[in-house]
Image (tube, helix red, strand yellow):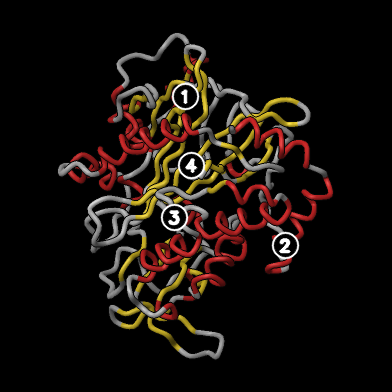
Amino acid sequence: MISKYRKLFNEQFTEEKYQALKEDITADFNYAPTFRLAETPFFISNELKEQLLEGCNDVIALIQQNNFKELTNKALELNSTVPNEDDHSTFIAIDFGICEEDGAVVPKLIEVQGFPSLFNYQINLFEKFKKQYPFLEELTPFLNELTPQEYLENLETVLCNNHPSENVVLLEIEPEKQNTKIDFYYCKRDLGLTIVCVTDVIKKGKQLFYKNEKGEEIQIKRIYNRVIFDELDLRTDLKLNFSFSDELDVEWAGHPNWFFRISKFILPLLKGKYFIETTLLSDLKEIPNDLENYVLKPLFSFSGSGVIFHVKREDIEAVVDKELYILQKKVNYLPIVQSPDGKVKAEVRMLCTWKKEDEAPTLLCNLVRLSRGEMIGVKYNQDKDWVGGTIGLFER
C-alpha cells in the first residue's frame, strides 16, 4: 500500500506545489525556516512501523528500569547538574536510521535524547502537506490513534502541567537566532507560551520572572527548556541574572539533567537487533584496525556537532576526555525514498512525551530527515546532499 502513496505523490508533485508549501509555512509568521524542507513526506510501511515501535519499546524499557538513574549518574558527574530533578524525563526522542541488513530493511538506533524536538512544527507541517496533496488525509503522522486535537492537548498537559500559559515560558538562548525557531513560533501560537531568552529572565530570591509585552513582570512557574548547555558554555558573552544550578522555585518541562542521562551515554547499554555496536572510548581495549567502519561522537553534543565520520587512529588518540566520547559502528543506510532523480536515505526520529503521573511515556509522532550524503541531519546540513526535514506518514 505504501508504494501506492509514493506513486501518487510522485505523479502529483510539481515544483510549483513545493514552492506553495514553503510559502504557506512562511506566511504564518512572515518567516521562512532556515533549514531545508524536503519536497516529500516519508511513507512508512506497516512492517517498518512495527519495527520502529519495537525498537522504541526496547529503549523505553531500559529507561524505565528502577536502577536507570544509578546507571546514568556518571553522565551527571561529567556535566553541570541542575537541582530538583524529577522522577523521569518529560521528553524522549529516539532516532533510527533506515538501514539494510542481510538484504532486509531494518531501523537501527542512531541516537536517543531526553530533550524536546520540533513537536509543534511537525503537526503544522502535516497540515501544510495536506493542502497541496489532499490524498494524504488517508494517512497520519500520529501514533496511538491520536487525533490532532488530542496531540495538542497532550502537549499542553506536558508543557503547562495545569499552570496558566502566561506562567510557562519557552526558554532558549537568543531564540530569534535559532534554526528551530519556527517550532517556537508555532508553540506560542498553538499553546500560548511566551518565548523568553535566558538573558531576559529576572531573578528575585528563588523566583524567576519575565516582562510581558506591556512591560509587566510575570512570574515563571514552569520552564519549557530548549537551552543546550553545550551552547550555553560557549556563549561567555551572555550575562544571565540566574544560574541553572541555583535552587529555584520553578518546575521544568524537560529538566536539564535528562539531556545528559538520556543521551549517547546509554547507547553502549542497549543490545539487540535494532542497536549498533557502541563503545565508550574510556572502555575501548584496543583501537580497531577497520576504523573506516566506525564513527567517533561526543556524548553530549547536539545536531551532530563534533562528530568525526572518517575516523583516524590519531583522532582517537587525540581525545583527552575519553569518558566523553563513543566509538560507534557505522550503519548501512538504505536509499529507500524514490525521488524523481534517484533514491534518498532516511532517518526517523520517534517523538515521545511523558506526563508527570504516567508510568510510561507516550509515543506521539515523528520527524524525518532525508539525505543523499553519508551522514544525515548534521547541524541542519545545507550542502548539496542534504534533502531536508519532513514528516513520516503511516496508514490509518
Quadrant of residue 83 within the rendered picture: bottom left
- Label 1 or label 2, whichever lies nearer to me, is 1
Q: Residue at x 67, y 34 (%)?
A: 6
**10 Å crowding of disc 4: few (<14), some (14-19), many (20+):** many
Q: The residue tagged with tag 2: helix, strand or loop?
A: helix
Q: Which amino acid does label 3 sit on?
A: Leu
- Distance of label 4 from label 2 (alpha carbons): 24 Å
- Label 3 or label 4, whichever lies nearer to me, is 3
Q: Which mark is residue 106?
A: 1
- Label 2 or label 3, whichever lies nearer to me, is 3
Q: Which mark is residue 146?
A: 3
Q: Which badge, 1 or 3, is on the more N-terminal residue?
A: 1
- Determine contact: label 2, label 3, CB under 8 Å: no
- Label 1 or label 3, whichever lies nearer to me, is 3
Q: Which mark is residue 26?
A: 2
Residue 104 in the image: x percent, y percent?
Answer: 50, 17
**10 Å crowding of disc 1: few (<14), some (14-19), many (20+):** many
Q: Which amino acid does label 1 sit on?
A: Val
Q: Which badge, 1 or 2, is on the more N-terminal residue?
A: 2
